Image (tube, rainbow, N blue to C red):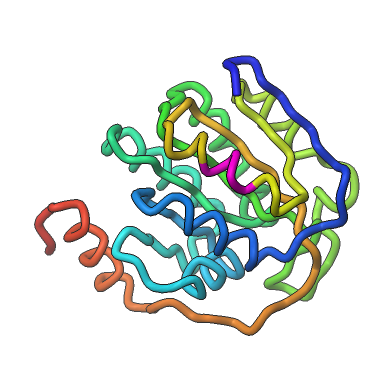
Amino acid sequence: MTATDFTAVRENTPIDRREFVSALIDRVPDALIVTGLGSASYDVFAHGERDGNFYLWGAMGGAVPVGLGLALAQPDKPVVVVTGDGEMLMGIGSLGSAAVRAPDNLTVVVLDNGHFGETGMQRSHSGLCTRLLDVAHGFGIRHCREVDSLGQVADVASNINARNGLSFVQVHIDTGEPPRALPPRDGVAVKNKFRTALGLTTF
């Protein structure tokens, strides 16, 4: 994508979220991955445990701030935030902070089914009238794209690996609920595993 790309693609039916996440992770082996609470964490963990996964269990709205700080601290590593539309809506202002700092190595991937999946599948703002892609672009994120096909995974991964600039990717997923795969709940252990993967001391 060029510096001014703003791509909206809605040609296919929504995709299976777990298939998309798995296909993406396969293509970004060096990426540090921060997950939002709920299904995003389940899907990333279901692909297989990685030392470079940092799971957020209950910090709703915190995924992008954590990913932004990580991207600034680790500029030589691609950083991917994988979260859902509800969690992103809770922390929507963090997109403005990300746009201001604009690290080349940060990609925000929002798995959007238009529902609050963790609280009973009520319709979310994005399932009613809010266009997250427009919101991200309005905050100043220049690389924005909408995805609803597994065939687009390779292009998304290519941009992540190349660290081509701060990116926002809205992935239109179906409302299916695959079996939950629960990552470790021990926050200290998750933190220490992640710090070890970065060659940092643990405490």
Tell which of 93 and 55 is nearer to you. 55
Name the residue: 59% across, 82% down: 180
The dominant secondary structure in magenta is helix
11 to the left or right of 163 = right
Question: Is residue 155 magenta-colored?
Answer: yes
Rendering coords of residue 43 (x, y %): 56, 69
Question: Is residue 125 magenta-colored?
Answer: no
Name the residue: 48% across, 26% down: 165
Tell which of 49 and 152 is nearer to you. 152
Taking 45 as reference, is 182 above or below it?
below
* Quarter holding residue 185: bottom left
Determine the residue located farthest toward the bottom in the rendered image. Answer: 179
Rendering coords of residue 201 (x, y %): 9, 57
Q: Which region is colored magenta?
A: 153-157
Q: Quadrant of the N terminus?
A: top right
Name the residue: 80% across, 64% down: 174
Rendering coords of residue 130 (x, y %): 82, 41
Rendering coords of residue 35 (x, y %): 49, 59
Q: Quadrant of the C terminus?
A: bottom left
Taking 189 as reference, is 109 above or below it?
above
110 to the left or right of 181 = right
Name the residue: 72% across, 77% down: 177
* Count of marks overlaid on the render: 0
203 to the left or right of 125 = left
199 to the left or right of 184 = left
